[in-house]
Amino acid sequence: MIREVTLETIEEFVKATFDIDKLPKVVGLSGELGAGKTTLIKSIIKFLGCDEIVTSPTFNIVKQYKVNNLDIYHVDLYRMNSWNEFLDLDLPIYTDNSIFLIEWINIVPEKFLKEMMIIEIEIVNDIKRKMKINV
Amino acid sequence: MPSDKIILGFETSCDETAVAILKGNDLLVNIISSQVDIHEKFGGVVPEVASRAHAESIRNIFHAALNRANLQISDIDLIATTDGPGLVGSLVVGYNFAKSVAWSIDVPLLTVDHMVGHLAAPLIENTEMKPPFISLLVSGGHTQIVLVEKWGQYTLLGTTIDDAAGEAFDKLSRFCGFGFPGGPAIQNIGKDGDPNKVDLPRPKTKHEYNYSFSGLKTAATNFLNNLDSKDKVTRSDFAASYQEAIVDSLMNNFIKAVKDTGVKNISGGGGVMANQRLREKINTFGKENNLNVYLPTPKLSTDNAAMICIAAQNNLITNELQLDDVRLSSVIK
């Protein structure tokens, strides 16, 4: 599925893409610097019902939010060298009541990518982005 | 007069392994062993790598600190350490080391919030600084305007809603291949550049004191992607313009907060406060408006253990710990 999205329609896009009762355990995002990965994740976290200010996890690698029983992990692999380095952090990925939203998945091996919902973001122009979703 | 107790401080919340010893007004030693070399090839700080590097270096730095101060371990009266926020893996190393030393010589262990440490840092060089003051705390992990009405009473007036200022420097620097950390790299490359050459936005947010750097980063990468050789923009011009956009954005909200609150004392801290252009602008703003400016020198702005000592000396502590009580936080309070 491919959708064109702008800042004005991003909430709508998130609503149409995610079902709150059937959330994926891991969402992987790809797209170049400035494509809007963090912006999309902010919108997803808001959709999940969390009011906190969502800031970039690039520096900290992981930021965690909680809403009701759901643990939300916002991860950025930008500064990591390998997927193993991420696994070394020993976070509860693929566990119940958790959702991992991961930026910069280009270092993730194929077999792990298969287990994720992938959203590829492509810059069309200054305001428009193309979102390609593989479930 | 501050107490003459000899305070040994540790700070390992991110990539600096820092140890300091403070006696009264004298900072006897302030050692910062940066892991920048190790992280350079990663283009940032990797938590696992950071905590391993802390574990390898902290003992040596501790002994070097005692030697340089010409002290024996038994001379220490108090130990202070950071208990967050920071990278948990890194915090644990300094925290446990501090705890072990406190236990071995049977002295109290005080814990200090990393951000309170930054707020207290100017006291090392300016013992006369008193609240109320407003501080601009800017680094790779945070970008905050904090109002200190009195010690212990901190109001967060504004914060970033996406990238921290240091991240904005780091990400673009990596994109351009300028180096890590991005702040010093961009400052250096832009030294002789024209800060007005490239027209970049000064992003505003809905909340009057909040910051947003994500749009600026996007605008800068868009500019580079569409760059035409006819534009005649040098690397130096581009770096200077980008730095100017970040510094201007930081100043706009900070100035507004200072004017709105009418506070007469201003200060700052964090790694980005080592940026010369930002320091220049804060000093000029202070001068023009008859404000007292208390900017710690760059070595006391970036993460260091002297700020942990001075906070402990002024009793700006989270806890005086029982030795079996461990709580660490990675959450920015």
Image (cartoon, coloured by chain):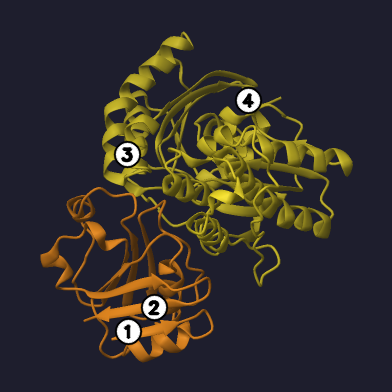
Residue at mark 2: chain: A
> What is the count of numbered marks?
4
| Colour applied to chain A | orange
Q: Earlier in the sequence, mark 2 or mark 1?
A: 1
Identity, as a three-letter code, of the amino acid under mark 1: Ile
Residue in view at x 55 percent, y 34 percent: B189
Q: CA distance from mark 2 to mark 3?
A: 37 Å
Q: Position of residue B230 (x, y in %)?
A: 58, 50
Residue at mark 3: chain: B
Q: Is residue B32 left or right of residue B277?
A: left
Identity, as a three-letter code, of the amino acid under mark 4: Ser
Which residue is identified by label 1? Answer: A2
| Residues flagged by tags 4 and 2 on a common chain | no
Residue at mark 1: chain: A
Frontmost residue, B137 versus B156: B137
Q: Residues within 10 Å of mark 3 (few under 14, many from 20)?
A: many
Q: Secondary structure at mark 2?
A: strand
Q: Position of residue B60 (x, y in %)?
A: 32, 19
Mark closer to the observer (4, 1): 1
Which residue is identified by label 3? Answer: B50
Mark closer to the observer (3, 1): 1
Any mark on residue A130, and which?
2
Q: Residues within 10 Å of mark 2 (few under 14, many from 20)?
A: some
Q: Quadrant of residue B284?
A: top right
Q: Given the current orientation, which residue lies at the most extreme front position?
A: B230
